[in-house]
Image (cartoon, coloured by chain):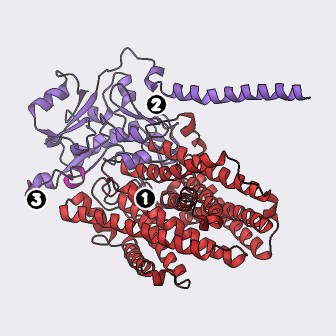
Chain colours: A purple, B red
Amino acid sequence: MNETRRTFLKYAGLSLAGLAALPAANAAAAYIPHTVHEKPNPDALKAKRWGMVIDTRRLNTEADFKPLIDACHKTHNVPTIEGPQEVKWLWTDDMHAVFPEQHGEFQHKEIEHKNFLLLCNHCYNPPCVRVCPTKATFKLKSGITMMDMHRCIGCRYCMAACPYGARSFNFKDPMPLIPEEDLNPAYPARTRGVVEKCTFCNDRLEKGMLPACVEASNGALLFGDLSDPSSPVRKALKENYSIVRKPNLGTQPSVYYII
Amino acid sequence: MLETALKGNSRYWGWIALLLIIMGVGGATWVWQLQEGLTITGLSRDVSWGFYVAQLTYMVGVAAAAVMLVLPYYFHHYKEFKNMIILAEFQAVGAIIICMGSIVVDLGQPQRMLNVILHPTPNSVLFWDMVVLNGYLFLNLLIGWVTLMHQRNNMLPPKWVKPLVYLSIVWAVSIHTVTAFLYQGLPGRHLWFTAILAPRFLASAFCAGPAILLLVAMVVEKVSNFRVGEEAKKAMAKIIVYAMCINIFLFLCEVFTAFYSGVPGHKHPIEFLFGAWNANYVSVMMWIATLLAAFSLICLIPPKLRENQKLLPWALIALVIATYIDKGIGLLVGGFTPNPFEGFSFYAPTMPEIMITAAVYAAGAFVVTILYKVALAVKAETA
């Protein structure tokens, strides 16, 4: 009797040790970057650090912005929701909102009241990635901050952490809100309760295409490798005065604004 | 031992029934939220955390009540707290359950909750908050239960409990610090972006937690033959008023930094909270909190008033409401206002939000009631 009990305890102990090893192995596996699982496409556009330059001189009126925003939102099935629970990847706001620490009392009136394009900055030091408890938001090797909408638990910590207000939460199911004729079947569907944001069109880059907004911008938006001095973005930055949003926070945005 | 919770008078069963009804109604509302999404809350793109997370912030402090009694009792052998220790430990259990419940109802995809464990992420403070909250829950439940079990058999608690008690003291500090770090490490959130936030969390926790505990103990005194002891009451009131003074001092340090420097990012949230722009219900509540805080200090600082047992409950209630408004509502809403665009976004909890929160609180109160019932039964048996 005692012998069997001892044997039982021995096996039970061993099984428990095995159960403990499983989460440890999972923890190790979780640290393998997501990029490892990707199968590279030979036609994909490549960069060490993707960046965008927005020529604000060429984007002034509602008519200049609308095609860009529509192109983005249609490509990614971004639903149109009125009110404070909206979802948006690409939008506009005024000088005070976009560059709150960079406006002066006696600034040029035109710039003061002008609208600027807003999107995820794909920071070099993304605070959203730092805080995410499940690695649902993560940085690709190419510098793009991505969002795994099937991993996200909807804690919205990343929204609190993003100093640029670039993230949206699906307060309700977005799919019924998208008209069937506008639906892009190539972009994955998502449910309510997850966070999403601009991905620099990583899905298009993979296919060798430029981001949808860049394509629709007639050259007002430039896209390229910030780490390559000969790239169009670096050339534009060399020749023009540009600013980034909230540089004092040290997040190092990859979106530059030519003023 | 748990079977003692099954015997009680009609008042006990009435209370249990009330809690179950609140849990049922709030639970049904939560099911509705699961179907509709968080769209039924007052949350928005700009104010992405609200009433639910505010409860975590506040109740994590209430769990602290334990440490303010456990520490003098075990470190300084202050025996007057003998009767209160078990209540403090079990209140911590209830408070942590409310904290964790508040996080769960706040999630957009609660069924994926285990992702936090399946994909552990040490660079996320939320991961560590989960670790410390669960750890503290486990520690208090274990220490309290084992001590009580041995007491019932007229035995001293086993030796291995003592190191766990010491661990729980350090651990209590960690739950506040880590929860404060949830906020204080975020760039661009002006109100939270201050190194004094964790100390403020500790100070407000160490006054609010024991204040609630003392109030609850007074209620328990009314409905049972449990007695706190006069000396213990006096000592607790002293702890509460010291912590409250430090809490107010730290807040005034924030006010000085903001307004003497004149830096807009520091000034704006405080100006908003006190109604300098876009006055709304938050500023009204903040002024009420200020008055109540002043009232509680006036009642608690002079020893003569502090020892007045008629006045004490009112001073404690004022203190609890004041700290709740400051840490529960002010800290959360002020943290999101101004928003990342230096603008104002209105937030107020909706009815479903309040009902779900009530259910979370009822669940915590339910657990505390059962544990207290057991503890009091054992105390009565062995007295």
Q: Is residue A166 above or below residue B335?
A: above
Residue drawn at x 40%, y 61% as measured from the top left: B331
In the figure, residue A224 lies in which quadrant?
Answer: top left
Q: Tell me the kind of residue under disc 3.
A: Glu
| Circles 3 and 2 in contact, beta carbons < 8 Å | no
Which of the labelled discs sits on residue A233, or is there none?
none
Report the residue marked by disc 3: A105
Badge 2 and badge 1 both on one subunit = no
Give the residue drawn at x 40%, y 52%. Answer: B183
- The chain letter under disc 3 is A
In terms of secondary structure, where does tag 3 sit? Answer: loop
Residue A180 screen position, x and y as percent: 49, 42
In this orientation, does residue B262 appear? no
Q: Which residues are magenta?
A: A95-108
Observer able to see residue B182: yes
Identify the main secondary structure in magenta: loop
Asked if residue A27 lies left or right of residue B50, the reply is: right
Q: Which mark is residue B201?
A: 1
Instruction: Check disc 1 and give the amino acid type.
Output: Phe
Badge 2 local density, few (<14 within 10 Å), some, or many (20+)?
few
Q: Which residue is mark 2?
A: A186
Q: Quadrant of residue B131?
A: top right
Q: Position of residue A139 (x, y in %)?
A: 38, 31
Q: Quarter-wise, where is residue B147 in the image?
A: bottom right
Q: Quote the CA–CA distance across marks 3 and 1.
A: 38 Å
Is residue A104 in the magenta section?
yes
Q: Is residue B16 left or right of residue B219?
A: right
B103 or B33, which lies in front?
B103
Instruction: Measuring from the top left, give residue A93's x and y in whole percent.
Output: 25, 52
User: Which mark is nearer the camera, 3 or 2?
Assistant: 3
Q: What is the quadrant of the C terminus of chain B in the image? A: bottom right
Closer to the camera in the image, A208 or B289: B289
